[in-house]
Image (spheres, rainbow, N blue to C red):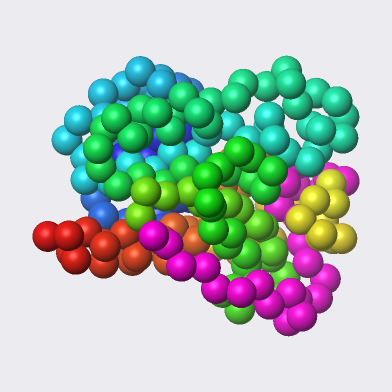
Amino acid sequence: MDLFCGAGGAAAGYARAGFDVVGVDIRPQPRYPFEFIRADALTVSLRGFDVIHASPPCQRYSVNTKQHGTSLTHPDHVAGIRARLIAAGVPYVIENVPGAPLRAPILLCGSMFGWTRLRRHRLFESSVLLFQPSCRHEIQRDCVSVTGHAGGRSRRDGAARFADTDAWRQLMGIDWMTGAELAEAIPPAYTAYLGAQLRAAMQDVA
């Protein structure tokens, strides 16, 4: 189950790792590429799933909203969704931006996958022991920031260049999203990497 699924960046990675994915979001997601349920992630039933991923809204913790003094106007769903996932009793992953109150998270970065232009740091908390490669920022030059609006003026993640939506799609490995959807998405390579570890852990338990 893919909670707060958006347009399906995380889901695509888990599908590559061999999972059948069902997405849940309170907003319509017409470009979500798998089975989709429109519902509130904080109340939808979690029964019947082997693994649950959740990407609660990140604006509460993002550098941009903190800089503009608006972070406290955004919801803080991490503790609430964590309690739900623990109660569900299956392996879980919670994703968010650096600065979010995740417990013992690992960090993934585009440089870990050999990408020379996309950094996009993201944190992942899990009930399963996950392994983290080392960042390789030294291989990166002219990093592109995928955040805000395509062609906009944000310098998060240490990025110094801005690009259009087509460039964002190429860098993220996502060809079906709008610019606004890409700005909130996780590169599928991240969750494919996590999904392989989750499947191995589940097989060890079985």
Q: Specify the farthest residue to the bottom.
A: 139
Q: Residue 70 or 186: which is nearer the viewer? A: 70
Residue shown at 50% from the left, 28% from the top:
79
Query: Magenta residues: mostly which secondary structure?
Result: loop
Q: Look at the image and say whether residue 149 sits in the magenta stretch.
A: yes
Instruction: Residue 25: give x, y in percent of width and height.
Output: 43, 28
- How many discs appear? 0
**Any part of residue 33 in sight:** no
Q: Which quadrant is the C terminus positioned in? A: bottom left
Instruction: Residue 139: give x, y in percent of width and height.
Output: 73, 81
Residue shown at 44% from the left, 39% from the top:
54
Q: Is residue 110 left or right of residue 15?
A: right
Q: Specify the farthest residue to the left.
A: 206
Q: Residue 127 or 123: which is nearer the viewer? A: 127
Instruction: Residue 26: give x, y in percent of width and height.
Output: 45, 22
Q: Specify the farthest residue to the front.
A: 104
From which residue to which does the magenta span run? 129-153
Q: Is residue 135 left or right of residue 34?
A: right
With respect to residue 95, does 171 lie above or below?
Answer: below
Residue shown at 42% from the left, 62% from the top:
130
Residue shown at 69% from the left, 64% from the top:
119
Q: Residue 132 or 189: which is nearer the viewer? A: 132
Instruction: Residue 175: give x, y in percent of width and height.
Output: 52, 56
Q: Which quadrant is the N terminus positioned in? A: top left
**Any part of residue 52 in sight:** yes
Q: Is residue 13 left or right of residue 15?
A: right
